[in-house]
Amino acid sequence: MKIISLKPRALRLFVFLVVGLFAAEVTAQNIHTRLNADSLTVGEIFEYSLILQYDQEYQKVIYPDTNTFPSSLELIERQQFKVSEFSDSLVYKLQFFDNKDTRISPLPVSLISSEDSTTIFTDPVTLYFKSVVAEGDTTLKPMKPNFSFQRPWWPWILAALLIGAFLYWWFKMREKPQQAEPDPEPEIPPFYNPVEELEKTLISLKKDSNIAETKDFKLFYSELSDAIRKYFEDLYQIPALESTTTELLRYLDAYGIDEALNDKTRIILRRADLVKFAKYTPTLDDAWKTYDEAIAFLERAKLADSARISRLKAQYRMKYAQHSPQNENEVNE
């Protein structure tokens, strides 16, 4: 084997080229992903971080849109940090809604400059599902025996009394001719205002709730979410009480509901689902913060849906103001 010997000057030039290539490789654009949890339960909130390093200033950096994440992940918030002159960090706070392992595919990050643009991709990440059911617990509780009830006798006595009363009325009324009575004035139902009903419900919930002592968070969140659902059912004729949270949010998107109302609804119903179905136990402070979101929903509804309420009131007046002048005064009041 022939050994090549280099002169000191040539050796220094060779070392300089190797170090330069290594430095260029180190400073090239690269991105790293990081999770703050190894496994997740249904409804658990976690952080998905992207750390970007690049070799020059770019006019614009386009990070992955939330639509690129799997549908079983719900975005809570997104925060961006400037770590250094050539380093950025983006943190997604997400909520996990699945009953199996979920994979986040490689996501694109675009670096745009005046000369050209570059796109790099993140590494794929697997979110491992963690069940709250004890592993191997397949025991079933035994069925309770059927309870036998005695046959009641009071319906027979009640039926005999009703028959006797009917016969007495029949023969008594046949002796006297019936006199025609004037038709009563039709009764006007009061105008039903969904915004006012929602406000009454929220005030009553805060007044009558003894959640600090009972710790019945499930009942509190159920009544709070049902109040929001009933508002949409009464005002927009959406089957909100019978729909799941996902189905109701799709209805709201289809009906073009005000964006602020849509966001408040998503926050309240998602938190209620965690308490009702994911066995999540909130604090007393969490419960009242969710109540404050409902109050913010109410104040926004007063502004966003005022025109719709006015149309309902006009239809109510047209329907009931035609019976008599007295009724017209009552309707206008």
Image: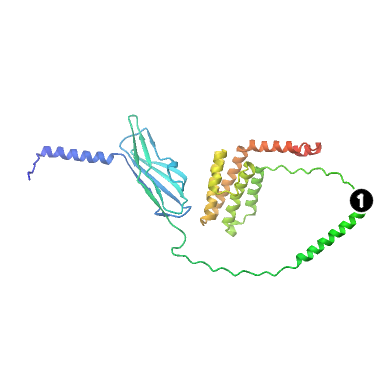
- When the figure is inspected, residue 168 is found, relative to residue 15, above or below; the finding is below
- When the figure is inspected, residue 214 is found, relative to residue 261, above or below; the finding is below
Residue 165 located left or right of residue 114? right
> What quarter of the picture does the C terminus occupy?
top right
Name the one closer to the observer, 243 or 201: 243
Q: Amino acid at mark 1?
A: Pro
Q: Is residue 257 visible?
A: no
Residue 8: % across, % down: 10, 39
Residue 331: % across, % down: 75, 39
Q: Residue, x 53% and y 55% (percent of image)?
A: 277
Q: Residue furthest top?
A: 114
Quadrant hosting residue 106: top left
> What quarter of the picture does the N terminus occupy?
top left
- Can you identify the residue that label 1 sits on? 177
Residue 10: % across, % down: 12, 37
Q: Residue, x 86% and y 44% (percent of image)?
A: 182
Q: Residue, x 37% and y 39% (percent of image)?
A: 109
Residue 33 located left or right of residue 182? left
Residue 209 located left or right of residue 99? right
Is the residue marked by circle 1 packed among few (<14), some (14-19), or many (20+) residues within 10 Å? few
Name the one closer to the observer, 271 or 245: 245
